[in-house]
Amino acid sequence: MRALLCAFVILCSGCTTPPTVFSSVPSAKVFSQDIVLDYTVSYTNLKTQKSQTLITHLEITPSSTAFIGLGPLGGTLFECKQTSQDIACQSINQAISAETFFADMQLIYWPQQTLQRHLQPNYTLEDHKLTRNLYYDNNLISAIHYSGQSKWDADVIFINMRHSYRLDIHPLHAKVSK
């Protein structure tokens, strides 16, 4: 399956649907080192307050990226593989699509300059010391808060206002090889 990333669908009820966030898939080529990240992620639907916890594995090399989500019993919930400018994702009954989840990880971990080059018109990404915010037409749609300067091993809170969900990300293992 070929897909452009991140079908963030509705800004608010009754509003016009904005375009996808990325005009093309941000590549992992910007990383000169191999990165392996294992996290627990708590997904909370902010409308229903229902939550679900999963384990994720994100592996980044300059030539490819793999992102896998495992349920509480170790079964695969989703898997995304990216090579060059292509991405293939498979989801199994998820509250959030694999493509959207992968795009969220890119918004959290990819360098701002790389993401900025791939944003559709009317989107703006602002980076501050411990926060990153995504705007559409000057309206905040996603907020990211980091617990420390190193994004790779920081606790992260990601709030998607457009789709009313929150991700609480806690590192289990982070390895960055040079």
Image: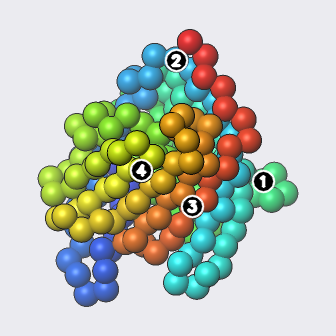
Is residue 82 at least partly visible in the picture?
Answer: yes
Alpha carbon distance from label 3 to label 1: 20 Å
In the image, residue 168 lies at what x, y percent? 61, 59
Circle 1 crowding by C-alpha within 10 Å: few under 14, some 14–19, many from 20: few
Give the mark nearest the N terminus, 4 or 3: 4
**Between disc 2 and disc 4, whose residue precedes?**
2
Labels 2 and 3: the sequence-earlier one: 2
- Estimate the spatial distance between the alpha carbons at disc 2 and disc 3, rounded to whole Å: 26 Å
Check contact, mark 2 vs mark 1: CB within 8 A.
Answer: no
Q: Nearer the viewer, mark 4 or mark 3?
A: 4
Task: Quadrant for the C terminus, please.
Answer: top right
Amino acid beneath label 4? Thr
Nearest the viewer among 156 and 120 is 156
Spatial CA distance of label 4 from label 3 is 14 Å
Residue at image mark 2: 33
Q: Which residue is mark 3?
A: 167
Q: Identity of the amino acid at label 1?
A: Gly
Residue at the spot of label 1: 75
